[in-house]
Amino acid sequence: MRIEVPHRSERFGAVRIHGVQEVWELDSGGDVGAPDDPQVWQTIHHVPRGAISQIAKRMAIVIPVKGERFKVLDGVLSGIPHDCLIILVSNSEREPVDRYRMEKETVRRFCRLAQRSALLIHQRDPGLGAAFAEAGMDALLDEDGLVRNGKGEGMLVGLAIAKLSGRSYVGFIDADNYVPGAVYEYVQAYASGFHLAESPHAMVRISWRSKPKIQGGKLFFNRWGRSSQVTNRFLNLLLSAYSGFGTEVIATGNAGEHAISLDLALRMQFAAGFAVEPYEYLNLFERYGGVIPSPDPDVMREGVEVFQIETRNPHFHEDKGSDHVQEMRLQALNVLYHSPISVPDVRNEILDFLRTQGVIAEGEEPPQELLYPPMATLDWDRFGRVLGDKGETFRQIEHVVPTSVQVRTPIPEIPDSESKG
Ligand code: GDD
């Protein structure tokens, strides 16, 4: 993949945010270190196919899914590069129709034909709740001991399973993407970002070039999503408040498609529901921005890099309506308003915006979103053991190689629901 060198990068303490980098070539060939024109080096990074593949082998892709169409899910699976491990975390209905079972069938069929492995679980599995409780993560559970509903919560489940699988990077891809080629490009971009990172602590966020909509019977290629415009504006305002210089460097406040080095992800706090992506930026600034003391001096020393890569494929996904968009942008502003590093100017602008939108009245404050503690200190042995014993929906789809009749189980030491009989 050939990716533009970022025009500018901005710092917030130990966090370096690279400006948006365009993809120039989806596949730039396989040779590492092939001689390129030195003048081109200064403007374009060449990430060889071999380097992408090395990183893909160490990456798990989490697909959070809640009631999406099976055909669309099947397309998403087909776009995930072969070397990545697929982890599907479902919060779909089990009754009257068991949609999780059908998702499982879709993944199983895909994996059989593509000869690859996958891990699946239902977010509301009582055994999964028990595993989190025993491992020290009660905060994620509701009063019935089940993992709470929400996309952020589904991502945390995926992150925990990625940790068990021993992969070094975790990426997220929504299940409602209509363009398998876009999915493929996102994962290539994740791997390219990690390849370019100078720090072991990195995050890669996707900024799509366009999001097509049908307007007046014609295709219109929208540049920005409706919630991104608001989230980015306020996150940039926070950066400017600290640096004293106006900036538009953040273009991916809401990026659902993103990837994080696993060790960093385990040290971070995540927010509930759709506050999850904007809060990732905030939490990096809170922990590593140097405004409040950091719990991780090693990360402060090595720094954190955030890449924002502008992909070529259009982002074409299920439109869930304007109430949903409004909910997403409000959740982003709620976390920004209540962050310990927020400043009066930013808080006042948020209040003004929310009042003009009719969301809060004079004298009211935005609600707090739930924030979860980092998962780094979980007892992973216990988590795996309880999940293997009690996880009724936990399923490992094994990669069978017919010639030598070898079976490759993603997490060999943990039994799944079917191997228990
Ligand atoms: N496991 C799980 N649990 N998955 C969920 C849940 C849940 O409670 N809620 C939603 N999902 C899945 C959906 O099925 C979909 O695959 C993905 O999470 C994103 O949810 P959508 O409801 O489709 O969100 P969206 O498309 O409007 O917004 C997406 O893009 C935004 C940026 O424009 C999301 O990725 C947002 O998080 C993102 O900010």
Image (cartoon, rainbow, N blue to C red):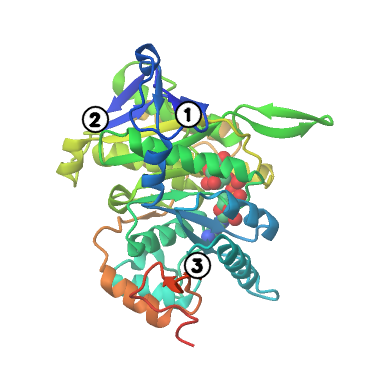
Residue at 65 percent across and 43 percent down: it is 179
- Extreme-top residue of the structure: 39
Residue wearing tag 2 = 13
Q: Which residue is under mark 3?
A: 120
Residue at 51 percent across and 71 percent down: it is 402
What amino acid is found at the position of numbered circle 3 in the picture? Leu
Q: Are marks 3 and 1 in contact (CB under 8 Å)?
A: no
Establish whether ligand 1 lies closer than 8 Å to the Cβ of label 2. no
- Mark 1 to mark 2 CA distance (whole Å): 19 Å
Foreground of the two, 318 or 147: 318
The reply to whether residue 129 is in sight is: yes
Q: Position of residue 416 (x, y in %)?
A: 44, 78
Counting from the top left corner in percent of width and height, residue 372 is at: 36, 56
Dot 2 amino acid type: Gly
Q: Which of marks 1 and 3 precedes in the sequence?
A: 3
Helix, strand, or loop for circle 2? loop
Q: Which mark is residue 421?
A: none
Quadrant of the rendered image containing residue 164: bottom left
In the rendered image, residue 37, in percent from the top left (x then y), is placed at 38, 15
Which residue is denoted by mark 1 in the rendering?
Answer: 251
SS class, disc 1: loop
